[in-house]
Image: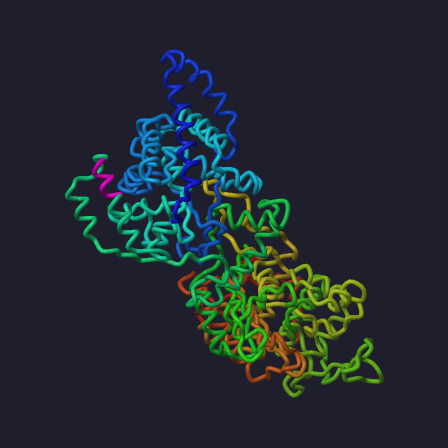
Amino acid sequence: MATPTPLSRLFTVLLTGVLAGLVLAVAALPGNLLLGFAAQAALREYAALPDALRTPATPQRSYLYANDGKTLITTFYDVNRTDVALAEIAPVMQQAIVAAEDRRFYDHGGVDLRGMLRALVSNVSSGTEQGGSTLTMQYVRNVLKSDPNRTAEERAAATEQTVGRKLQEIRYAKALEQQLSKDEILNRYLNIAYFGSGAYGIAAASQRYFSKPPAELTLAESALLAGLVQSPEAYNPIDGDADAALNRRAYVLDSMFATGAITAEQAAQAKAEELALDPSDQANGCTATASAADGWGFFCDYLRRWWIAQPEFGDTVEEREQALRRGGYTVVTTLDPQIQATAQQQATDIYGYDNKRAVPIAAVEPGTGRVLAMAVNRHYSVDANPDGQLNYPNTVNPLISGGGSVVGYQAGSTFKLFTMLAALESGRTLSTGFDAPSRLPTRYAAGSDDSACNGQWCPANANPQWMDGYRMMWDGFGRSVNTYFVWLAEQVGQDKVVEMAQRLGITFRAEADANFAENNAANWGAFTLGVAATTPLDLANAYATVAAEGTYCAPVPVVSVTAPDGERLPVGDPSCRQVLDPDVARAATDAARCPVGQQSAFGQCNGGTATSVNRILDGRPVAGKTGSSENAATETFVGFTPQVAVAGIAANPDDPTDLVGSAVQAQVIDAVARIIATAVDGEPVESFTAPSQDLVGTPRRPVERAPTTDPTSPLSDLRRWFQNRG
């Protein structure tokens, strides 16, 4: 604490003397006259108070929890403060702050005449600066200097050493005392006072110094914290002088004895206790999530981006950002810690944190759009990367959700789903057949890098021996036959396929993709092969729409948002709409059983590109699709059950020319399957509903009917279908 100068001591003496004289003059008025004046003026004075004093709007930090409502992800704050009720503050803490700052708190009406006179004597005799401010007056000062709705000049004026300011403080304090109980004032004071080390209010201070809630503070801890308020930096045992903090603690304990709050023995015992701090760092923002929870920062960043797009939190991005950092909200997010942990482990098992290649993964709940996990083998951090590396091992770029400079990655044949859906919606059936050749000449012009047939685009099958021949939607999807789906897209119209992808939430973030979709979609021949950039989150949510039988839900990262007063805000509820006929979605799902090594309800699957999924899920009903972009530049897999959809893409986020290679595909497939297994562990087995005969058609091959008693088997699905049709 700075040593008072002679000039400042003189000013304080004069100021205190003037104020004491004014109070004495008021006190000399006849009692009835004084009471009458007070009664008439009380309501008028209270009504004239600044809004911040009548209805405090002190900045508070917001808390982000996982979907269990208990696991803390991080907090956001400009000012580290969380308001708590007086009942949540240990009684010894309440007694300590009164003893330290205003012993006659319960005896005066906001202004303490004795305190002012005592301060005057002390200032004159010892050269110290004591203004005789009561807790109520200190509360007024704290509110006015921190009110976010006041200008910087107005906030600065709240601490000016002027007679006018002090008189205003007295007037406001007396008005408050006429309308608020002592407990209300004490509670407000404890929630706004600064305790040093960045902690505003007793809840933040209790956590900062002792890692506990204020209800659990001991006598010695309470006395230490109460002693900080007079000079938070000088007495701060973390950042300042620990000996000074202990001396100040002893003073508070003596003062508590003097007020009768504790006995002499209790004071002596507390004084004898050693300084036992248990400080906690106060997490602030997405980069402050626990290091053991890598990946949580990417989810947190997605939530922050979602938050600043919600008009409920303000008219501008700045207002919404301020609401998150100052509004004191309790946010229960959709993040599932178990699914997230599995996803993060799987991503880092494929590529470590120091690998230039990445596996961003997203998990979404069908029917709600709730984002359950977002993982990638990166640290969410602004720390510099070694050796000039771009996005590894540290980055804050949204590699999983896209945004900013991240437009996404090619997802290959996973886009064949959109062609199949568009075909089914147009009236074609799952039995739609085509004798798929090894190479298919098309009407689309060849690009500079495309294989060409007389100047036309001419796609080929990756494995002709396994893929060529007569195919229907089931095995065309199961074996990922390029020429079948390019042909099918030509029949339907590429613009219909592009529109279908957009309807299911695929966003074209790359400028070239967006221009093609808007201006030339009908000629985007390669679209069905997944040449447009997308993200794991978009892709998982698109497949979740099919899992939910055509109900699209906008991705959402929160379950609930609750204001400090307990009011739940109208945000975070699922925003869903039916974008597909349920029968169309069921038909597409039936075909999507083929890639994962399961059987459709009609026994038409005869080979798949991700058959290990069925083994990992132990026969549980699941569907999905693999995707390899040209030359195996990226490898993708999306899998889904009725309860969860998961997408993972292996790619180099910084260099699309760095080909990840086909060998990693099996790892991506198994990783997604294991994440699904975690998500459905302990959940009831849910089967997919078979489509109607209208969308099945007449398969060319006979229905396979392997004997089984498994209730989740394809045969059982088929049996239920016949039963449902009567």
Residue closer to the observer: 517 or 528: 517
**Which residue is situated farthest in the front direction here?**
6
Question: Measuring 38% from the left and 28% from the top, which residue is drawn there?
Answer: 110
User: 457 left or right of 528?
Assistant: right
257 in magenta: yes
Residue closer to the observer: 542 or 241: 241
Q: Quadrant of the C terminus?
A: bottom right
Asked if residue 205 is positioned above or below residue 108 in the image, the reply reads below
Q: Answer yes or no: is residue 719 visible.
A: no
Residue closer to the observer: 460 or 190: 190
Q: How many marks?
A: 0
Residue 89 point in image, percent of width and height: 32, 42
Q: Quadrant of residue 187?
A: top left
Residue 710 point in image, percent of width and height: 44, 69
Give the colour scheme of this rendering. rainbow
Residue closer to the observer: 96 or 162: 162
**Which residue is situated farthest in the right direction here?**
454
User: 377 left or right of 290?
Assistant: right
Asked if residue 302 is positioned above or below residue 170 in the image, the reply reads below
Main SS of residues in magenta: helix
Residue 454 point in image, percent of width and height: 85, 85
255 in magenta: yes
Asked if residue 623 is positioned above or below residue 26 in the image, the reply reads below
Magenta segment boundaries in residue numbering: 252-258
**Which residue is situated farthest in the left direction here?**
265
Q: Quadrant of residue 502?
A: bottom right
Residue 484 point in image, percent of width and height: 71, 77
Q: Answer yes or no: is residue 331 visible.
A: yes
User: 184 left or right of 699?
Assistant: left
